[in-house]
Image (tube, coloured by chain):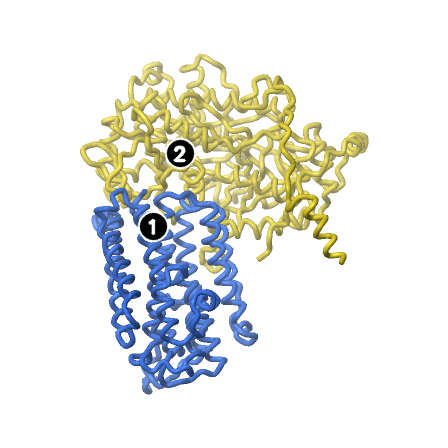
Amino acid sequence: MSGWAWHPGPREVNIRVMSEVETEPAAAIAAGYAIPAGSRDELLDADGRPLSHARSLMAALDRLGPAALSAAGKRRDTIFMQQGITFEVAGSDGERRDRAWPLDLVPRVLTSAEWTIIKRGLAQRIRALNAFVDDVYHAHEIVQAGIVPWSLIVSRKEFARPVHGVRPPGGVYCHVAGCDLVRDGEGRWRVLEDNVRTPSGISYVLENRVAMTRLVPELFAGHSVRPVDQYPSLLLDALRAVAPAENEPTVVLWTPGAMNAAYFEHAFLARQMGVELVEPTDLVVRDAVCYMRTTAGLQRVHTIYRRLDDSFIDPLEFRPDSLLGVPGLVRAYRAGTVAIANAIGTGVADDKAIYYYVPEMIRFYLDEEPILENVPTYLLSNAKERAHVIGRLEQVVVKPTSESGGKGVFIGPHATRAEVQEQARMIEDDPSRWIAQELVHLSTAPTEIGDGRLEPRHVDLRPFAVFGEEIRIVPGGLTRVALQEGSMIVNSSAGGGSKDTWVLDDGDDTDPAGGRDSQLPPYRPPRLPDVRYGGTWSNQAQQQQQQRE
Amino acid sequence: MLARIAQELFWLGRDLTRAEFTARILDGAFHADVAGVASQRGVALSWEGVLATIGAKPPALGEEETEVPEYVALGRIEVARLLTLDTDSPASVVSCVARARERARTMRDVISTEMWEALNSFYLMLGGYDLHAALQTGPYSFYQDVKERCGLFWGLLDRTLLRDEGRAFLEAGGHIEQADMVLRMLRVAIPSGSLDLDPPALETEAIAMLHAVGGFQSYRRAVRTSPTVGPVVRFLLFDSAYPGSVSASVDALAEALTAADAQPRSSPPVLRLGRLTADLELQRRSPEPGAGIESVLEQVQGELELVDHDIDARYFAIAALAAVHL
């Protein structure tokens, strides 16, 4: 088998080369780089010169050269197949087969100043969404204030009647959240979508970083990139913090099974956290207490990190035909003997129609101005907004509410006349099913296109937050990239890839989260006794003597 | 530990060991075949014998071709294809490895990453193998690869896997399969009455048998007499210093289950294994068993089957219960 082409380690930082780059800015590896009209680029300016935070990265890429970059790409595919970092795609013959996870070897770089804005904006948003979920199932204050109509809330598919009036430990509902962010044509960050049900992708963030350090260690030279591998500990801490147990809570990760598309991630997280990965048949509820079936009989479970939708978790309360559920689980949850993350019923907060109200929620619950803005959105059930949109459908994006994963999305500029008419008819039929958004020109980033050359491809960003006792966010997140030229669809099932996301530790940050402390004195290793690799000196001398004779 | 996971681990160990021993036995049979051993009595490590050992059915013949299938002699090409790279045959090496890999894939949180990667690349390697080319040049390197990859897996286990219940079940699976495979081979290879003869002429076959389990060198170092059938069988059955012997496997299995069980003193499989160990020791001390050896082999294998049932009932039944309710 092809082994690791293991590099001895990051090459030494060559200060002279870096200063040369500043006087001679355009990166040769990105020759002929043309950023699409209306978009910004993450690393280069309009003339193809690296932005200040990307200078040393582009210089390193230049030194590496196209040939080495495409060779590293081949090694990457072999290694990912070997490690089983794959996802299933349907081939042209309809058969499903494993493909190596598509990681682009050019990282996306964020400055720490920019990351601080994203981090704060995200934490603010998650606090508001969490407050909203609590409100929906208890006091209905936001409804009484006339901000969100109650009819809209109860008509959401994810509204969970069985948990009305249930408050989980600590009042935390959205233990794990991931928001899709994009940078628009003016360079501002906007939230495209919230995900507070079961956001996936964090395992790829961690695996991408490991793969990058192995495949292209040269690129890390001259950078101080914030680590991401603390995520599993953050998650486990959060899950333990919410457990209804006095000591040593048992945490499990519940997967729908090995057939699930995100199974790799479930197993990855279970392994990284050291918790059991359970399937529905492993769990059982007796007298409103949840147990798992072990070799030594039943064992109590305190926190379940579930990776399947509400509607499947308990056939007694939700879909009666669910084979994936555990009968009686909601009863145990109501009795407070088991914590479920994310809490049941959070889906109501990441519905696309509710998304429209999130900036208002932030003002209402937190009395703050939103740090991250929404994409301009129109609720089509509102007659005035509908009239504003319906005549210019070819300019906007129309999305069905209560859907995720890009299902049923209508992209105006790419639609034919007939499709526009069909969409207009569907909107008139049932306006409340749809929202419309202005088209955002996603930013681009240099991406290796197979032969070592770099071309601009559109990217988004999904940071991941964990909410236990407090909100913690891993630096960076998953950058998804649309590998087709001009495409803005970044889903991996639709030919999307991913990039490692670097948040630089460039000292520009006002509040380093888990960063290194520069106050510490320089570390000096202790003196150790000399290491011997054989007999004493006199012994060896004697042997040499004998050999000579 | 989850009962379902424990069972999967147990079978992962069994599948992988089965793959290894299939490769070993085929290797030994190739050796005997090429060396031109064809005696009517004595050790019969023939291709049909190999098939019987591994429990694989011969290829199903079409309805039209019903012309007495028992006379269709299976040569080394057919058997090699059937037992190495035939994905349709559940007994083939590649099927065993595929099953093991599929189990490991669903338990990547339990086994160590390095073990998973070793197993996954083993599986991918088998997919890229050209058996026809291998048979032309001699399949030695293929069997060698399989043995080495299995060795790598168990070695990584030793280095990287926590000594917990899961590991105990994984190892238990490996040990019970190893004992079973050796017993199967011995029972098939020794026709009744051959031990009475024990002519020196049978030495080649006995050596082939030792090669088939990878114990030739150990035998030479441990036993003074030349490798004829009697001493070889006794060596493979009773010599607890040799890790591949039945008695060593049984000891290791008992040890693994003792580690896995919260109350080993009241555990039926552990107790049964204790009796089996004592039995084997008694047999070892009794004078040369001669013709009685077949019944000993049969009895030990029967006991192991009961141990397997006991393991199922004690540790895994709770998971099967859930499957029934579903």
Q: Which chain is blue?
A: B
Under mark 2, the amino acid is Thr
Q: Position of residue B26 (x, y in %)?
A: 44, 71
Q: For mark 1, what is the residue?
A: B256
Q: To which quarter of the image does residue A402 belong?
A: top left
Residue B124, relative to residue A411: is it above or below?
Answer: below
A447 or A64: nearer the eye?
A64
Residue A454, relative to residue B179: is it above or below?
Answer: above
Under mark 1, the amino acid is Ala
Callout 1 and callout 2 share a chain: no
Q: Position of residue A342 (x, y in %)?
A: 36, 31
Q: For mark 2, what is the residue?
A: A401
A68 or A302: nearer the eye?
A302
Visible residue check, residue B326: no
Q: How many marks?
A: 2
Q: Which quarter shows the N terminus of chain A?
A: bottom right
Q: CA distance from mark 1 to mark 2?
A: 55 Å
Label at residue A325:
none
Foreground tag (1 vs 2): 1
Q: Colour of chain A?
A: yellow
Q: Residue furthest top?
A: A367
Q: To which quarter of the image does residue B100 belong?
A: bottom left
Which residue is at a point 42% across and 25% down the rendered structure image? A467
- Please give left or right for residue A417 compared with residue B88 in the image: right
